[in-house]
Image (cartoon, rainbow, N blue to C red):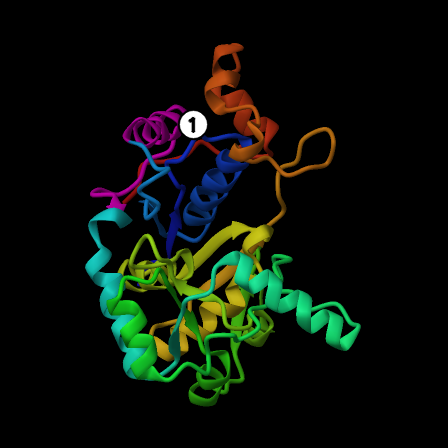
């Protein structure tokens, strides 16, 4: 079986150098390992993702010289897949409804910090762990609140999840030279994180593990800003009976101030670089790629 790699951007803005690096690195790995290169459009956020940005992704990647297999998987066309995965989690009793607003959570945490005199623990992204306010709700009461239209999300019950899938949670990390090493994941540091958002029937964490399995992704190449998320993904794979790919988390492209490039910070886009007369070959060399991307197979 050929290794399968994927580049999975969200069409909520123009691609920048960081996206170019990740896309080129995936293509480079696919070429080195004799594998396949896929493109996936992660557009579950229907309020921010726009058709013109999706079209721009295809245009920018084609300009870079990349080729990918068709058809492209668009997440917005596969919500039923995510609903089915969530239903399995619910059947296994590892999720629960949360009716708390951000204000409710902040107030609960402030009270606990005042009681203990210690800062409340945080997840790898720096967000405060959910204090479990709604975890003790009786199922009947939660159902009544939901039927009454009370906004809510669904959270992983980390204690129940780890009881069903106690681990050890191990995945394989790989490098460009073909080296591999076993790594231990620690899902518990995410706490009872949101797995279904109130505005869409999925989340990044749920949809990405479902998509990787359905597309037969064997090697995941993504930035170090997503390295900690791998811990949670390993747990979801175990709970859903899905295979665990190998992982490589690359360094991030940063600006002159040392901050990572981001659409939200209006980092210089590939379109702007192209307008300055920078060619694709020059940009590939600037990012450390001397290869010429070849057509996908």
Q: Please say whether residue 207 is visible from this viewpoint.
A: yes
Q: Which residues are magenta?
A: 51-74
- Compared with 182, 31 (above or below) is above
The quadrant in which residue 286 appears is top right
Residue 155 in the image: x percent, y percent?
A: 43, 70
Q: In this image, 153 relative to 280: left or right?
A: left
Horizontal side of residue 219 vs 72, given as left or right: right
Q: Residue at x 53, y 63 (%)?
A: 104
- Percent position (x, y) of residue 164? 42, 88
Left or right relative to 229: residue 202: left
Residue labelled with disc 1: 64
Q: Is residue 208 left or right of residue 215?
A: right
Name the one closer to the observer, 102 or 293. 102
Queried whether the magenta region covers residue 108, the answer comes back as no
| Camera sees residue 241 | no
So how many labels did they put on this image? 1
For label 1, count other residues whose C-alpha is less than 10 Å away and answer few (under 14), some (14-19) or many (20+): many
Identify the residue at horizontal 66%, vertical 36% (top origin). 254
Question: Which residue is farthest right?
Answer: 117
In this rendered view, identify the residue nearer to me: 59 or 292.
Answer: 59
Image quadrant containing the N terminus: bottom left
Disc 1, SS: loop
Look at 47% across and 38% down and name the residue there.
Answer: 24
- Given residues 175 and 13, the one toward you in this image is 13
Q: Write the residue at 34% across / 40% down.
A: 47
């Amino acid at each position: 079986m050929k290794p399968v790699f994927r580049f999975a951007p969200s069409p909520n803005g123009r691609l920048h150098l960081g996206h170019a690096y990740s896309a080129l690195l995936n293509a480079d790995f696919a070429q080195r390992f004799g594998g396949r290169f896929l493109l996936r459009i992660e557009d579950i956020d229907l309020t921010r993702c726009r058709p013109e940005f999706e079209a721009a992704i295809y245009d920018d990647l084609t300009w870079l010289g990349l080729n990918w297999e068709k058809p492209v998987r668009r997440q917005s066309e596969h919500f039923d897949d995510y609903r089915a995965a969530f239903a399995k989690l619910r059947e296994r009793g590892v999720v629960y409804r949360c009716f708390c607003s951000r204000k409710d959570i902040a107030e609960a945490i402030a009270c606990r910090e005042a009681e203990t005199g210690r800062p409340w623990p945080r997840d790898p992204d720096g967000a405060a762990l959910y204090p479990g306010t709604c975890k003790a709700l009786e199922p009947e009461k939660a159902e009544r609140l939901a039927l009454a239209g009370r906004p809510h999300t669904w959270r992983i019950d980390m204690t129940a999840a780890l009881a069903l899938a106690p681990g050890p949670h191990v995945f394989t990390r790989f490098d460009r030279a073909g080296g591999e090493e076993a790594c231990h994941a620690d899902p518990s540091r995410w706490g009872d994180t949101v797995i279904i958002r109130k505005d869409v029937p999925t989340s990044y964490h749920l949809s990405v593990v479902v998509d990787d399995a359905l597309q037969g992704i064997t090697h995941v190449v993504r930035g170090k800003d997503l390295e900690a998320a791998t811990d949670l993904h390993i747990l979801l794979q175990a709970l859903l009976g899905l295979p665990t790919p190998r992982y490589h988390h690359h360094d991030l492209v940063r600006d002159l101030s040392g901050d990572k490039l981001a659409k939200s910070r209006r980092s210089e886009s590939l379109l702007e670089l192209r307008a300055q007369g920078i060619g694709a070959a020059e940009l590939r060399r600037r990012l450390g790629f001397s290869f010429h991307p070849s057509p996908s197979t």
